[in-house]
Amino acid sequence: MLQCAKKYGVSFDTVNPSPQILGQLPLWHHFGQDPNKMQRNNSASCKCLQANHDVWLVHEGLVMLRRLRDEEQKPTPTCKCLACSEDRHVRSCNNPHVCTSAVERRLSSLLPK
Ligand SMILES: [Zn+2]
Ligand SMILES: [Zn+2]
């Protein structure tokens, strides 16, 4: 009985990783990477994301994307939403919108849905 539960527990985790496990995966070197899609690790916004935003893991990328649901969010470098203002002033990013879009593209190339 116990062996059975353990066996199914393990295979369930492997086939269907939980959001918590997915969130801990690195955003920039990912085993789920589609080899047919272009590597974006070297673009300027990726460097900014790593150096200024300190975004390394999938869940950190998802936190960054929360601003897209903010009504204040505008697709411009001067977006006045709280997250973009913070990125510009605290994190010395000069175009938080471009960085956010880079995370969005990156995540969509990593995650199946
Ligand atoms: Zn914004
Ligand atoms: Zn940035």
Image: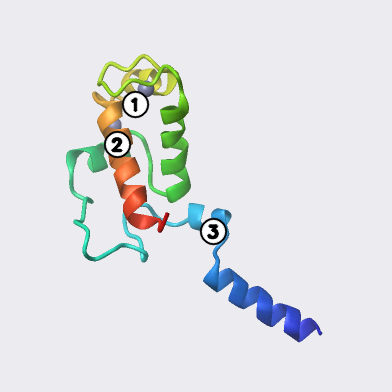
Q: Earlier in the sequence, mark 2 or mark 3?
A: 3
Say which amino acid is labelled 3: Ile
Could you say which quadrant of the image residue 1 lies in? bottom right
38 relative to 67 in the view: left or right: left
Q: Is residue 45 above or below residue 8?
A: above
- Mark 1, Cα crowd under 10 Å, few <14 / some 14-19 / many 20+, is some
- Asked if the residue at label 1 sits under 8 Å from ligand 2, the reply is yes
Q: Residue at x 31, y 62 (%)?
A: 33
Identified at 37% across, 64% down, the residue is 32
Assign a secondary structure to mark 2: helix
Instruction: State which image quarter holds ligand 2.
Output: top left
Q: How far from the left and from the top, in percent, is residue 27?
A: 37, 52
Q: Do residues under tags 2 and 3 come within 8 Å of each other at their CB atoms?
A: no
Residue, x 33% and y 20% (percent of image)? 74
Residue with the mark numbered 3: 21
Task: Specify the amino acid type for callout 2.
Answer: Ser
Q: Secondary structure at mark 1?
A: loop
Q: Earlier in the sequence, mark 3 or mark 1?
A: 3
The residues bearing labels 3 and 1 have C-alpha atoms spaced at a distance of: 27 Å
* Relative image position of residue 38 (x, y in whole percent): 19, 56
Q: Is residue 19 above or below residue 94?
A: below
Which mark is drawn over residue 101?
A: 2
Instruction: Check residue 91 in the rendering and tell me which mark sits there, or answer none.
Output: 1
Q: How is the image coloured?
A: rainbow
Q: Quadrant of the C terminus?
A: bottom left
Spatial separation of the CA atoms under disc 2 and disc 3: 23 Å
Give the label, 2 or 3, closer to the camera.
Answer: 2
Residue at image point 41% right, 42% down: 61
CA gap, disc 2 and disc 1: 17 Å
Circle 3: element type:
helix
Percent position (x, y) of residue 93? 28, 26
Disc with the residue nearer the chain's start (2 vs 1): 1
